[in-house]
Amino acid sequence: MRRVFVDRDAPQRDAIEEAARWIRAGHVIALPTDTLYGLAADPFNADAVRRTFEVKGRAAERALPLIAADEAQIAAHLGPLTPLARALAGRFWPGPLTLLVAAPAALAAEVTGGTGRVGVRVPADAIARAVCAAVGRPITATSANVSDAPATADPSDVERTLGSRLEFLLDAGPSPGGPPSTIVDVSGPEPLMIRMGAVPWEEIHACLQRA
């Protein structure tokens, strides 16, 4: 596995571009986010998605979350957000709020875990957003660990546990860690809390009340 170091505050363009090339070529890489390290692959490439499940040893019925550079990238590749989703995105993105939206037909079916929906967010991490921008589409960001093992914010843990299964690790030092992203289903007429996380439901409810 190739391990490349990158400055979290001023990411080097060549490191970002190399990470993007690996993803565009159908490989699975590890990269930092605003919470933990994640496994990044092209969610529109069925072979890359299957490889992601193999790296994690993850059951195929479990969906893979996505991250994106910004709302415009999500609209271009997953479809425009509903007014409800846009209100939440405007308040909490970039940040640890994942929105469940309807999955487009072009997305690899395994990404949705058979639900027809996909979770996506814009992370509060310049490196992760820059990689998404360089790839030109949203990418996967499931935690970089063996399934059912603890997720990690330490790139050295990623190398120790998954180094033999990955092609590339973008190392920005330890990620902030903390709770996982909050997941809200906005694919229907009413928002549904799917997972409590870093963004409290009270804040989400207050945002929707104002909207």
Image (cartoon, rainbow, N blue to C red):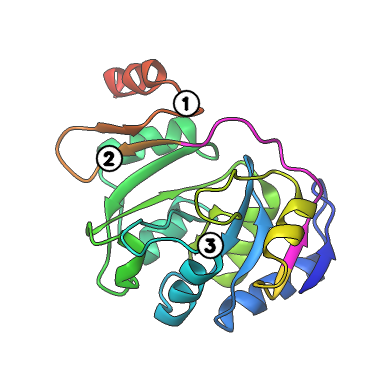
Residue 115 in the image, given as x and y percentages of width and height: 22, 56
Q: Quadrant of residue 34?
A: top right
Query: Along the line of sight, which residue is nearer the eye, 62 or 136?
Result: 62
Q: Is residue 176 left or right of residue 210?
A: right
- At 44% across and 51% down in the image, what residue appears? 71
- 167 above or below 122? below
Estimate the spatial distance between the alpha carbons at disc 1 and disc 2, rounded to whole Å.
Answer: 14 Å
Q: Which residue is mark 1?
A: 199
- Quadrant into which the N terminus falls: bottom right
- 22 above or below 75? below
Q: Is residue 24 left or right of residue 171?
A: left
Q: Amino acid at mark 2?
A: Asp
Q: Which residue is mark 2?
A: 185
Q: Earlier in the sequence, mark 2 or mark 3?
A: 3
- At 38% across and 64% down in the image, what residue appears? 76
Q: Amino acid at mark 1?
A: Val
Q: Residues within 10 Å of mark 3 (few under 14, many from 20)?
A: some
Q: Quadrant of residue 14?
A: bottom right
- At 46% across and 67% down in the image, what residue appears? 53
Magenta part of the chain: 169-181
